[in-house]
Image (tube, helix red, strand yellow):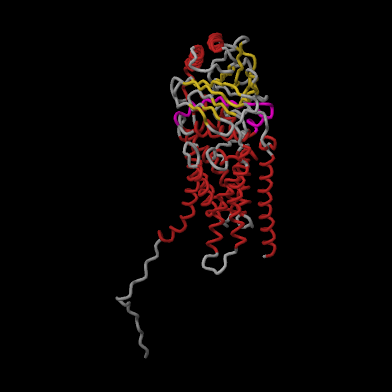
């Protein structure tokens, strides 16, 4: 007969710890949390904060998050990074219309980033992965800048680098090359750390691999310093004295247009005060004056009172003045126009904004958009886009015209320089976005454009921040928000073309081809691997 022995727990031995759901979950949350943090770091690198360098750890962290992830994981992690980036960056879009448009736009932009990160995860198994990954990011930015509804380039990495060491590269290959260099450097930092950690504890570290990784960090930095001679603010074609008028608006928000006459009177009054200051010797006589976008929402061709107010102000200062106006033709769509107003001849030339803002100046799919926000009906009549490049001859200075939102589009700015602009004007209206970060983000774009094309840039804004920018991207004068003011300064005029202007969209096209080649390589390898199995 056999005895059954029942084991007895030793009271002196600790019991094994119970399986904890939280303990199993925590490691799974590390990468998603890091993805969000990487997006937030990208946001924090943008103005008004001078923390441009945060973009580098942001992409280094994103490189770790996406390293050799599957496509589905890359998409999900990229979506989290995109939301961490775009939700705070685009918060100003809901300033007066509530959270729904803001959340919808941020989610749509985050989806683009998610698709890009899926591609970055795919190429992370290739040799020289930081190069492929950075090219994929630029391809993603290029697509975002074109679709849907003409694209939305806001949030291009290049636009956060107005104070950064990489800025001179804008003069070499425009915003695509600038974005590529910054992203490459960030991913390169991750690659260096990864290579060192992968061989920690071994006798020999593969120097060639570490050197190649380090090159992805050092080459963009060295390239930026090599491009410094292209950043030049000398006066090739002499100088011009320009005045930028900020008349201010009666109140913040979407309803500022309800007092259109008050907005017009504010700008006319400031111009007449400038004329008195010039006569008294307190300010220099400008060669021409720039008013902002929407400085006259009363059509001066149809409204006699508005025409008289503008005409008297321009005659008082006695020089050509660019007036931003909403034109209301008998048939067809409204036009967001800039008018060259001569003190003797009156309105003599117009430029119609070419890149008009969807859901702001026109409503695509109006019946669908109305389901999300009734504010779409504030735009009762859509604006139509212009077709001609805007370059005005203002007292002998050829001035390229880029209206507000257009500053985000590479072609809109480059076209004016190719058509002979010696100076760029960016008349804008940011009153509907209150005291948000939007105006500072847009000002940074103009600073990048100044270096990209080696041109002075003057930014007159209805409510601020108005600014005068040198060709090297330096802001020499600027106003405060919602404060009437006039900026007068002598700016250098230039006619030479930077490599970025000459090359046009070619750098972006080359980088897009590199990205496509990397993604194609991944696809071919995947097919071969499946066949081998």
Of all residues, the one furthest to the left in this rendering is 11
Residue at image position (66%, 45%) is: 511
Percent of width and height locating residue 502: 70, 35
Percent of width and height locating residue 222: 60, 47
* Magenta stretch: includes residue 428: yes
227 or 150, nearer to the observer: 227
53 or 386, nearer to the observer: 53
101 or 509, nearer to the observer: 509
In the rendered image, the vertical position of residue 267 relative to residue 233, given as above or below: above
Residue 121 visible in the displayed image: yes
Q: In which quadrant is the C terminus drawn?
A: bottom right
Percent of width and height locating residue 286: 56, 18
In the rendered image, the vertical position of residue 149 relative to residue 311, given as above or below: below
Range drawn in magenta: 411-435
In the rendered image, the vertical position of residue 509 relative to residue 247, given as above or below: below
* Drawn side of residue 151 relative to residue 372, left or right: right
* Magenta stretch: includes residue 313: no
Q: Choose top left, top right, bottom left or bottom right for residue 356.
A: top right
Residue 260 visible in the displayed image: no
263 or 332, nearer to the observer: 263
Q: In which quadrant is the N terminus drawn?
A: bottom left
Percent of width and height locating residue 359: 55, 30
Residue at image position (47%, 18%) is: 258
Residue at image position (53%, 48%) is: 56
């Amino acid at each position: 007969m056999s005895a059954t022995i029942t084991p007895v727990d030793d009271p002196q031995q600790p019991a094994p710890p119970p399986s904890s759901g939280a303990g199993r979950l925590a490691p799974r949350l590390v990468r998603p949390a890091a993805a969000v943090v990487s997006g937030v770091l990208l946001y924090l690198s943008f103005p008004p904060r001078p923390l441009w360098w945060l973009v580098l750890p942001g992409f280094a962290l994103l490189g770790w998050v996406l390293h050799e992830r599957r496509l589905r994981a890359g998409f999900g992690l990229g979506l989290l990074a995109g939301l961490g980036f775009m939700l705070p960056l685009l918060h100003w879009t809901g300033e007066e219309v509530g959270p729904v448009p803001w959340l919808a736009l941020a989610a749509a932009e985050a989806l683009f980033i998610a698709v890009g990160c899926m591609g970055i995860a795919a190429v992370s198994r290739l040799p020289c992965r930081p190069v492929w990954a950075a090219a994929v990011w630029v391809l993603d930015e290029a697509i975002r800048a074109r679709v849907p509804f003409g694209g939305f380039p806001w949030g291009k990495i290049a636009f956060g680098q107005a104070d950064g060491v990489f800025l001179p590269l804008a003069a070499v290959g425009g915003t695509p090359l600038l974005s590529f260099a910054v992203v490459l450097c960030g991913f390169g930092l991750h690659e260096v750390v990864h290579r060192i950690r992968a061989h920690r504890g071994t006798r020999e570290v593969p120097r060639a691999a570490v050197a190649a990784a380090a090159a992805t960090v050092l080459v963009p930095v060295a390239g930026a310093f090599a491009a410094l001679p292209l950043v030049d603010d000398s006066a090739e074609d002499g100088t011009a004295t320009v005045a930028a008028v900020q008349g201010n608006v009666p109140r913040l928000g979407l309803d500022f247009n309800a007092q259109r006459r008050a907005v017009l009177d504010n700008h006319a009054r400031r111009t007449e005060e400038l004329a008195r200051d010039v006569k008294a010797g307190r300010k220099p006589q400008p060669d021409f004056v720039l008013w902002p976008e929407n400085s006259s929402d009363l059509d001066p061709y149809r409204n006699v009172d508005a025409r008289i107010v503008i005409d008297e102000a321009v005659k008082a200062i006695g020089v050509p003045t660019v007036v931003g106006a909403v034109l209301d033709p008998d048939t067809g769509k409204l036009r967001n126009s800039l008018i060259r107003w001569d003190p003797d001849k009156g309105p003599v030339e117009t430029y119609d904004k070419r890149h008009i803002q969807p859901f702001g100046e026109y409503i695509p799919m109006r019946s669908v958009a109305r389901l999300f926000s009734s504010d779409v009906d504030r735009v009762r009549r859509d604006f139509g886009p212009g077709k001609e490049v805007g370059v005005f001859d203002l007292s002998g200075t050829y001035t390229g015209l880029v209206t507000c939102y257009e500053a985000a589009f590479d072609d809109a700015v480059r076209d004016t320089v190719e058509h002979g602009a010696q100076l760029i004007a960016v008349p804008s209206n940011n009153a509907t976005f209150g005291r948000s970060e939007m105006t500072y983000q847009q000002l940074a774009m103009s600073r990048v454009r100044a270096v990209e094309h080696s041109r002075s840039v003057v930014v007159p804004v209805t409510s601020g921040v108005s600014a005068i920018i040198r060709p090297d991207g330096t802001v020499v004068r600027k106003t405060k928000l919602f404060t009437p003011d006039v900026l007068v300064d002598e700016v250098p005029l230039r006619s030479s073309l930077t490599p970025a202007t000459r090359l046009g969209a070619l750098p972006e096209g080359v980088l897009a081809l590199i990205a496509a080649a990397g993604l194609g390589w991944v696809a071919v390898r995947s097919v071969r691997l499946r066949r081998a199995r």
